[in-house]
Amino acid sequence: MKKAASVLVFLSCLFIMTAALAAPVGEAKVSQKKVVIIPFINSTEETKEYIGQTINEKFKEQFSGDKYETISDAIVQPILVVNGYDATNNELADNALLMNLAKETDADYVVAMEILHFINSRHASFFSTSAKSEVKLRYKVYSKANDKVTTFQVVGKGNNKVTSIGVPGIGTAMKRGIDEAMDEAFVKIEKL
């Protein structure tokens, strides 16, 4: 009886070890999607440094981790230059360039974004003041899975309310608007 139990325990351990060794290694790397992010365009008169920082941090947050790999600017910039793309023209890259970038970098997504406008305002009442910002972003995204370019716009609204004496900063409202719009865009991009 002891011998049968020992054999059963041995076979169970052997089965578990075989199953563990047969499991695919590096599966997360295989399903990781490559993303090219073209430097964003700011078509507004708002040129505060925190706008660019907020956008770059948000892109980094969205396209990081086990699911995505962002292709470095060192690889992307020379391809943009060779193809004659000039961001100072304040125009999003054309569809052919997005497709060419995807082909040359083997990217699953190529993302181009433009800030179309900010609408900023302040509101005051007897007990509180607030700063509000609405931001509109336009995206052009190439998806290798669909082999097509999709263009869409998103709007984000930010609010910075102070209920005591003080003047709220419009910058915080603008950052919140950018975050909200980019979150909405990211959901759309993942569905492409």
Image: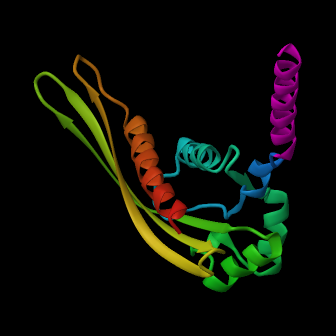
Farthest bottom residue in view:
96
The residue nearer to you, when weighing 180 against 77, is 180
User: Which residue reaches farthest left?
Assistant: 126
Q: Is residue 89 above or below residue 162?
A: below
Q: In which quarter of the view is residue 103 placed? A: bottom right
Tell me where the magenta segment starts and ends, as one range.
1-22
**Residue 95 lies in the magenta stretch:** no
Above or below, 74 relative to 109: above
Q: Residue at x 10, y 24 (%)?
A: 126
Q: Is residue 120 left or right of residue 106?
A: left
Where in the figure is residue 164, as x and y percent of width and height? 23, 17
Q: Is residue 149 left or right of residue 4?
A: left
Q: Nearer the viewer, residue 58 or 167?
A: 58
User: Could you tell me which residue is drawn at 88 percent across and 25 percent down?
Assistant: 7
Residue at (51%, 68%) from the top-left corner? 139
Is 6 contained in the magenta span? yes
Q: How is the image coloured?
A: rainbow
Location of residue 83 (image quadrant): bottom right
**Residue 85 position within the rendered picture, expressed as x and y whole percent measured from the top left:** 71, 77
Q: Residue at x 84, y 63 (%)?
A: 75
**Residue 155 location in percent, x, y?**
36, 58
Compared to residue 50, the image places residue 12 above or below, namely: above
Q: Quadrant of the N terminus?
A: top right
Examine the residues drawn in magenta and state their main secondary structure. helix
